[in-house]
Image (cartoon, helix red, strand yellow):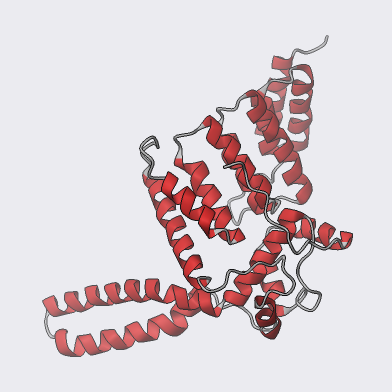
Amino acid sequence: MVKSAEEIWLDALDSREKGIFDEAIRLAKEVVEIDGKNTEAWMAIAMWSLPPPTKGKPVQPSLQQSAKSMSALKKVILYEPENLEAWIIGGRILLDHLGMLEDALQWWEECRVQFPKNVTPVLEQIAILVRLGLYEECAERLAELHDEGMEEPTSQQKMRMQGVKGMVDRAAKMEKDEIFKPQDPNHPRWEVIERMRKVKPLSSTFWLVAFIAPVVFIFGSVAMTFLGGTIFGFILVFLLILAAFGILTRLSMGLLQSRNRHALDVDRAIDYETSSGKLCIPDSIRGSVVYNSMLKNRSPAVTERLEIIIDSGEKINSKYQPNLPNW
């Protein structure tokens, strides 16, 4: 007796419940072969193609897993464009696991068509534009966040908005005199990167421990000497220390970015390579200390894809410009 799509789907859910993912995916694919518009099954294929959740550190998907999931997600939004979860997951895969920044920009632009009043697609586009060094476009998108027609952001979205605005401000200040364009082999920043190719970037944790904490400790010691004789004075000193730590941390992040600018430039160059599918990083820098440090922050899927691009050996055109949506 031939099973119906509904019966096969129940078998797929049962296999998923038992942790038999390969069987669950196979059955879900049978469902969409019978009913190609079954978005529930397509969504399941997208999610089950990725590594299952773990209690510890999450397992990152491979290039093949990311591509399979992305393919299924495109089917979901084709037949159910109002599925915001599918848009969000797809945007994350395109950016974090495939390194396809141009495609991610277009993906979020198509999402905006379905959710014109939602701030999430705009925020995601701004974050991508910052990575590409396109600050004028960032300013335009930031202005859109305050349009009258936009929905009131949730508390989580408000935090994301503040984070994105801070990211734009810090990056724009760091590059106010010279925006790095990695596609230009004669850009002066390449000389700086070449000189500092053996220098690792400082982590924010090391920066806080090595530079901010000692200053705050000295400030706290002095304040305790003059104000710490009473319970009120002790509380006041504690509050002053907290305030000093917060203020110094915010003020010093610009200094940390300036110190790490050569590494951030390499990071942008990697983004340009994975986004365009062509090479721009000189051989003398590829494989260097700073290059390897930044590559460690990338997902295995991005690293796999970058290896394919490197093997192709095709160089980027010096006049290349990121392909932006029709704004």
Task: Locate residue 212, reporting x and y percent.
Answer: 40, 81
Q: Is residue 300 left or right of residue 157?
A: right
Does residue 112 appear left or right of residue 234 in this picture? right
Q: Quadrant of residue 19?
A: top right
Q: Nearer the viewer, residue 27 or 143?
A: 143
Q: In the orientation shown, which residue stands out farthest toward the right?
A: 312
The single residue placed furthest to the front in the displayed view is 319
Q: Residue at x 44, y 35 (%)?
A: 117
Q: Is residue 75 at all visible to an observer of this figure? A: yes
Q: Nearer the viewer, residue 310 or 279?
A: 279
Q: Is residue 288 left or right of residue 150?
A: right
Query: Where residue 69 sits: x, y (%)?
Result: 71, 39
- Percent position (x, y) of residue 30? 79, 23
Q: Nearer the viewer, residue 324 or 236?
A: 324
* The C terminus - image quarter: top right
Q: Position of residue 318 (x, y in %)?
A: 75, 64
Q: How many marks?
A: 0
Quadrant location of the N terminus in the rendered image: top right
- Picture layout, residue 230 above or below residue 37: below
